[in-house]
Image (cartoon, rainbow, N blue to C red):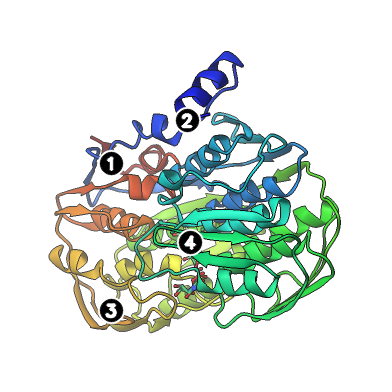
Amino acid sequence: MNRVARLMVADLLSIRYISYTDSSCLFDSMAQFRIIGQQPIGGTITVEGAKNHALKIIAASLLSPEEIVISRVPDIGDVRLLLDILQAMGARVSYDAAQEVARIDTSNVKSGEMPAELVRGIRASAVLMGPLLARFGEVTIAHPGGCLLGRRPIDIFLDGFRALGVTVKEEADATRCTAARLKGARIFMPQVSVTATETLMMAATLADGATVLENVACEPEIPALAAYLNRHGAKIRGAGTPTIRIDGVRKLGAGKCVVIPDRIETGTFAILAAATHSAVRIEQCEPAHLGALWALFDRMEVPYTHGKDWVAVQARGKKPFQAVNMKTHEYPGFATDLQAPMVVLLSQCHGLSLVHETIFEGRLFYVDKLNRMGANITLCDPHRALVQGPTELHGKNLESPDIRAGMAMVIAGLIAEGETRIENIQQIERGYANVVERLQSLGAIIERV
Ligand code: EPZ
């Protein structure tokens, strides 16, 4: 049944069909952000559920035929696209954006065939491979898309699947994986990969026998995913450490899950408060997930306090902070997703900062846009940049290259003298829900035009 027919059937059955393509009219490609900089900013902002946890819990819905109910699901493009992919594969999906609750029943999903045109839009679709192989023994995927941060291959995924007994056929425009049964294995990851860790952990939950994953990622979203799966029958130990042990089981149940706070949103807003020299309180967050950021703030002499689920940055006043050398690193090191916002803050600090981006080879190219605004950043090589500050920034017309660099440009626009316009904002709205309204509530002059 093709997609249009499925839409009609969904309507007839009064299933509220969520469609990224329908809602992409909200993210139409002509829309821009218009920002007037140097406005007084202050107040309280609430953090959404973590994009990079929500997407993996949505993928985990494929591991069980029972219904999963996920709360605190942020209303962002990537979530709607992944729900759209599941719906196109036959799952019954509903998403209440006001309540931020998604319900998914994958009992009708019959095969691992994924809609190529949708898969290309999002890197997280690669995470679906593990659950589909575990449930159906087959998956065919067009090369996943997402932010252009360098090559972003899936070779570590495929080598892991081969170790679990999967036959992998790489064709011109797709990769076809099949396995009668997944067999537990010991896998040493050649490189730490967040989504490869998650997809192999999920695949191993239904494999025959024990699997040991070594040199895995330790990001907080991974133990959160493991905890949900363990509540519904999985046997996973060590998630959040470099070695995870999984004893395969015959089947998994499903139930309720609450998405953890988004640590990247929290860090982004804390950096925004420091860069705009404002007093901002960030609530419903998990400061314990951002130790590397607070360590940098201490060295930069950025004033802040925090409790268990809130952080308050008290940066009112014009004193530039101290420049500092920073390096992105796998968790618990400084998150690569905070690198771009931090570079904007460093452009306002006294002195020379060396920025070392160790995770992606294409994640510093946005700095030329900040230089056009007046920043003084030298790109030494694809992994290192020197930032001289403080510099005055002036509003410009820019284009967002990816979620996090796009948000860095929003912060630069809030600091800059005059008007800044940012195009390609769906690259920002993919990762930050209601960002205009939330920044307006802090006093920013920002609108979607
Ligand atoms: C996840 O991407 C996040 N995305 C990224 O957030 C985040 O920047 C990244 O982890 C690092 O923390 C999601 O969780 C959906 P990796 P992921 O695999 O898993 C290489 C955002 O803005 N690699 O940990 O794709 C890869 O090229 C996004 O929210 C291979 O070589 O990142 C990179 O250099 C951006 N082969 C390094 O590993 C593979 O098979 C780490 O990437 C897989 C990865």
Instruction: From this view, report whether residue 99 is shown above or below residue 281.
Output: above
Amino acid residing under circle 1: Ile
Residue at position x 22%, y 53% in the image: 399
User: Which sits earlier in the primary sequence, circle 4 or circle 1?
Assistant: 4
Asked if disc 4 is less than 8 Å from ligand 1, the answer is no
Amino acid residing under circle 2: Arg
Q: Residue under circle 1?
A: 446
Q: Secondary structure at mark 1?
A: strand
User: Which sits earlier in the primary sequence, circle 2 or circle 1?
Assistant: 2
Amino acid residing under circle 4: Gly
Q: Secondary structure at mark 3?
A: loop
User: Which sits earlier in the primary sequence, circle 3 or circle 2?
Assistant: 2
Instruction: From this view, report whether residue 186 is shown above or below residue 309.
Output: below
Q: Residue under circle 3?
A: 350
Q: Residue under circle 2?
A: 3
Q: Secondary structure at mark 4?
A: helix
Report if the CB atoms under discs 3 and 1 are less than 8 Å apart. no
Q: Residue under circle 4?
A: 267
